[in-house]
Image (cartoon, rainbow, N blue to C red):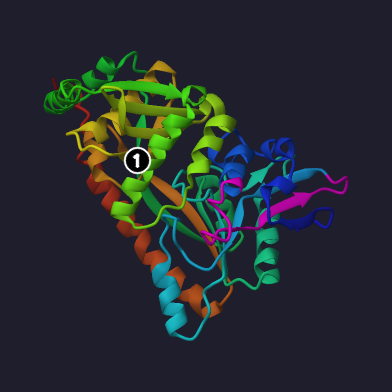
């Protein structure tokens, strides 16, 4: 690391002024000071969940913040969506100690975007060295930068980190003027399917609205917390995000919060939470208390496309997993992470695993791409 830069670790995002932090990134809401502070102040990150902030900051000789990264010390691998449980199990069976580790990410958010926040031409290598020093100082086994940009992953790879690929499904706006315009780009069979799904939701008796952050009242957030807990506890068994987190999010993120909301006779029954960035709508959390056919697809995917077209957004990112998204216009894209592992033996084993995993992921993506719902040239 450049001798002119000084490294510090911060157990709270509040120790770093919001203006300084936000000057280092491109407006992605999931690495914003406001989002990270909502997580900390609500108790969603911290001792209760085992996400202990150790935010990395680099300052120049004048004390100005020139680079930073949202970083957490962890004794588990939950809430990350890039799975390393197998690495941990193998290392600990061999007598090693995998935890604690350092996680550079937006907690509980499988949202691609910048993780190494920089300004003033600071190279990725400077933050890479800072994170290596943090790993050693905190006696951690490794550092994991997840859902970073392809450019960040490549730069970290040039610093000796291990790159890893993943897959998500994103919708891309091809200059559509309306949702009907988008439907026109699909094959006839897929168009009919989506129209039938939307019609079923329309005939269900639900009232569906799109609400922005300031329109969400405390009663809306209480209802959404019920939706969230109902979904998470039925599927995974643990809710990280607290009820206070939602209220803080609505207060601090303003119009970046976009909620697709469904009610029956004035009673809330489902909601899909998105955050809007400068170039994408990011789907994040969904929940319901009533099962309605196709409602999940309508609120999470189709309404998101509607919103993106109306607001001229280039992309909708609908979160982790879900091959069913392909039939609704969301195609496979690569996601990236990078991993620094201190122990030579574990590093070699992980490098071999990733070397084998990479072509398998690309082959799977090629196979999934053949399922595209978009019509071929000349097709009706």
Q: Is residue 303 left or right of residue 201?
A: right
The residue under the point 39% across, 71% down is: 86
Which part of the image, by quadrant, shows the N terminus? bottom right
Q: Is residue 92 above or below residue 130?
A: below
The image shows residue 236 at horizontal and vertical percentages of: 33, 56
**Outermost residue toward the bottom in this view:** 95
The image shows residue 70 at horizontal and vertical percentages of: 61, 50
The residue under the point 36% across, 27% down is: 260
Q: Is residue 215 in view?
A: yes
Q: Can you identify the residue that label 1 sits on?
A: 227
Q: Which residues are the magenta region?
A: 41-63
Give neighbour class at mark 1: few <14, some 14-19, many 20+ (Cα, 10 Å): many
Q: Nearer the viewer, residue 188 or 51?
A: 51
Question: Which is the main secondary structure of the residues drawn in magenta?
Answer: loop
Q: Is residue 209 above or below residue 171?
A: above
Displayed quadrant of residue 227: top left
Circle 1 SS class: helix
Q: Nearer the viewer, residue 336 or 7?
A: 7
Q: Is residue 283 in view?
A: no
The residue under the point 61% across, 60% down is: 159
**Outermost residue toward the right in this view:** 62
Displayed quadrant of residue 53: bottom right
Which part of the image, by quadrant, shows the C terminus? top left
Q: Is residue 281 left or right of residue 54?
A: left
Q: Nearer the viewer, residue 283 or 3?
A: 283
Total label count? 1
Q: Is residue 335 left or right of residue 11?
A: left
The image shows residue 81 at horizontal and vertical percentages of: 41, 54
The image shows residue 334 at horizontal and vertical percentages of: 39, 46
Whether residue 163 appears in magenta in the rendering, the answer is no
């Amino acid at each position: 690391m450049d001798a002119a830069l000084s490294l510090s670790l911060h157990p709270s995002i509040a120790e770093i002024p919001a203006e300084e932090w936000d000057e280092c990134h491109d407006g992605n809401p999931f690495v914003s000071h406001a989002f990270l502070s909502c997580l900390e102040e609500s108790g969603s990150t911290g001792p209760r969940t085992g996400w202990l902030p150790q935010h990395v900051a680099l300052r120049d000789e004048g004390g100005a913040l020139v680079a930073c990264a949202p970083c957490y010390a962890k004794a588990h691998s939950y809430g990350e969506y890039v799975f390393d449980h197998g690495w941990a199990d193998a290392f600990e069976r061999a007598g090693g100690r995998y935890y604690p580790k350092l996680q550079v990410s937006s907690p509980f958010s499988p949202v691609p975007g910048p993780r190494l926040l920089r300004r003033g031409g600071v190279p990725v290598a400077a933050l890479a060295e800072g994170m290596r020093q943090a790993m050693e100082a905190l006696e951690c086994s490794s550092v994991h930068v997840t859902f970073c940009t392809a450019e960040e992953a490549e730069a970290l790879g040039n610093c000796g980190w291990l790159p890893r690929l993943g897959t998500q499904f994103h919708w891309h706006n091809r200059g559509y003027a309306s949702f009907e315009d988008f439907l026109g780009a699909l094959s006839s069979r897929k168009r009919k399917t989506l129209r039938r799904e939307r019609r079923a939701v329309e005939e269900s008796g639900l009232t569906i609205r799109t609400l922005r952050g300031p329109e969400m009242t405390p009663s809306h957030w209480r209802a959404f917390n019920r939706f969230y807990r109902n979904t998470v506890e039925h599927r995974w068994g643990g809710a990280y995000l607290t009820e206070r987190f939602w209220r803080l999010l609505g207060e601090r993120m303003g119009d970046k919060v976009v909620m697709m909301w469904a009610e029956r006779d004035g009673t809330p029954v489902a909601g899909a939470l998105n955050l809007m960035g400068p170039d994408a709508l990011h789907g994040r959390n969904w929940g319901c208390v009533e099962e309605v056919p196709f409602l999940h697809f309508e609120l999470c995917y189709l309404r998101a496309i509607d919103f993106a077209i109306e607001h001229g957004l280039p992309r909708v990112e609908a979160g982790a997993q879900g091959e069913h998204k392909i039939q609704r216009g969301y195609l496979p894209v690569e996601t990236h992470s990078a991993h620094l592992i201190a122990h030579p033996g574990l590093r070699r084993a992980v490098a071999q695993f990733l070397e084998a995993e990479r072509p398998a992921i690309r082959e799977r993506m090629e196979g999934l791409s053949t399922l595209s719902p978009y019509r071929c040239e000349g097709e009706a």
